Image: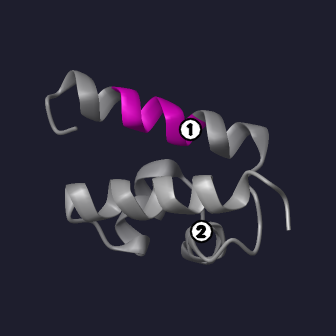
Amino acid sequence: MLGQSPSFATSVKALRAKLGLSQEDLAKALGVSFASVNRWENGKTQPSKLAKNQFESFCQKQKEQGRL
């Protein structure tokens, strides 16, 4: 397992919990599949650079809107 997977998995789970989103809702918001979000949370895969950038951008927008 890659060293970053637990921390990224934790970040995804924490974000979803804070925003009250399902894995499917987060997947739609990021433009990825439900399976991708599920695998990230379970530490089975790492996001592509594009998906990671989309996740970071999504987090930034949520912060700007006062949701995080």
Which numbered circle lies on residue 54?
Answer: 1
* Residue beneath the point at 27% across and 35% down: 62
Picture layout, residue 31 above or below residue 37:
above
Judge the density around disc 2: few (<14), some (14-19), many (≥20) Cα neighbours within 10 Å.
Answer: some
Picture layout, residue 20 above or below residue 38:
above
* Residue highlighted by disc 2: 33
Residue 46 x %, y %:
75, 58
Judge the density around disc 1: few (<14), some (14-19), many (≥20) Cα neighbours within 10 Å.
Answer: some
Please indicate whether residue 40 sits to the left or right of residue 16 in the image: right
Rounded to the nearest whole Å, what is the CA distance between mark 2 and mark 1? 13 Å
Query: Is residue 18 within the magenta segment?
Result: no
- In the rendered structure, which amino acid carries the disc numbered 1? Gln
* Residue beneath the point at 56% across and 70% down: 41
Q: Secondary structure at mark 1?
A: helix
* Earlier sequence position, callout 2 versus callout 1: 2
The residue range painted magenta reads: 54-60
Picture layout, residue 48 above or below residue 10:
above
Query: Is residue 56 within the magenta segment?
Result: yes
Q: Residue furthest left?
A: 66
